[in-house]
Amino acid sequence: MGLWDRNCVAIGVVHLHALPGAPSAERGFDACLEAALSDAHAYKTAGFDAIMVENHGDAPFRKDRCDPHVPAFLALCARQIRHTHDLPVGINCLRNDAHAALGAAAASGASMVRVNVLVGTVATDQGLIEGCADTLLRYRQRLGVNVDVLADVHVKFGTPLYEAPSPALAVTTIERGGARGVIVTGSRTGSPPEIERVAAVKEAVGTRGPVLVGSGADPSNAAAFAACCDGFIVGSSCKNDGDAGQPVDVERARAFITAVNDATNTSSRRDPHA
């Protein structure tokens, strides 16, 4: 069964610690990799369907091109997680180095990348970020890899300068931007989007591709979101104290999967209690 054939996909986020060279780095590469593999194992134990690896600890982020060691380490993490835990893996290279993420995905065998700004222009704390769909999809064509692009619609920590309602922008992102699916978030990490906005995006997108909730999902709202989306990208609510910088708490992660399974009446993903 392919990832997008599952009923309400659950993708767990591995928030990497600050990598060497980042302002708040305190650990070497080996320690960062060990923590990433531990979080991935906890997600698999809880019953998640896939993993998304991102350089979350590297803030403040570059708005586009990051240092070369970042995608190299993302590729290493993704490959190790795939081989160790046998899960599909995605890569998000913050803030919006989609080309580096795609290169890392090609090198590691990752099956997807997350792109914060694929189309349009967004004002962010890193400055103005412009969409990169044209160059990204041409790069993917040159690499000859089958890597899905999942793109945010009105991404968190940003104000869109391309004025379009979320439903219309979601359709544009898929039809003109070439995204496999779209992600709807709240205003910041750990903040949920309005359920009405998710439902409107899903209604507009229809069968064009999956619509994922990309922030703020937890056991208390999983059922409401599951009724109007195709899956989740989840991190903070599965961490100790709900803090994205902390390790994954297996019991919190299990509680989320149980809530999703109860809402969708499915047993298609791994048994969270196995």
Image (cartoon, rainbow, N blue to C red):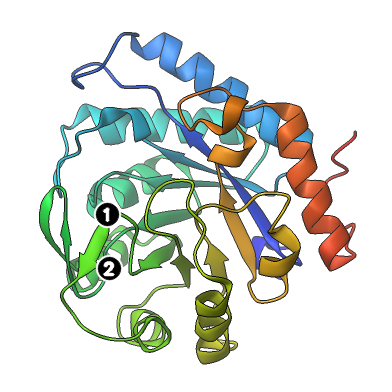
In x, y percent, where is residue 195?
58, 72
Vertically, is 135 above or below 63?
A: below
In x, y percent, where is residue 227?
72, 74
Could you say whether the residue bearing mark 1 is in a helix, strand or loop? helix
Q: Nearer the viewer, residue 145 or 48?
A: 48
**How far apart are the alpha carbons under marks 1 and 2?**
8 Å
Q: Nearer the viewer, residue 66 or 124?
A: 124
Which residue is painted at 62% across and 27% down in the image?
A: 248
Judged from this view, the residue extending furthest toward the left is 127
Could you say whether the residue bearing mark 2 is in a helix, strand or loop? loop
Vertically, is 22 above or below 66?
A: above
- Please indicate whether residue 195 sits to the left or right of residue 272 in the image: left
Q: Assess disc 2: are there few (<14), some (14-19) or many (≥20) residues with their C-alpha within 10 Å of its C-alpha.
A: many
Q: Amino acid at mark 1?
A: Ala
**Residue designated by label 1:** 98
- Please indicate whether residue 261 sits to the left or right of residue 130 in the image: right
In x, y percent, where is residue 136?
24, 64
Quadrant location of the N terminus in the rendered image: bottom right
**Residue designated by label 2:** 118
Label 1 vs label 2, nearer the camera: 2
Q: Amino acid at mark 2?
A: Leu
Q: Is residue 268 visible?
A: no
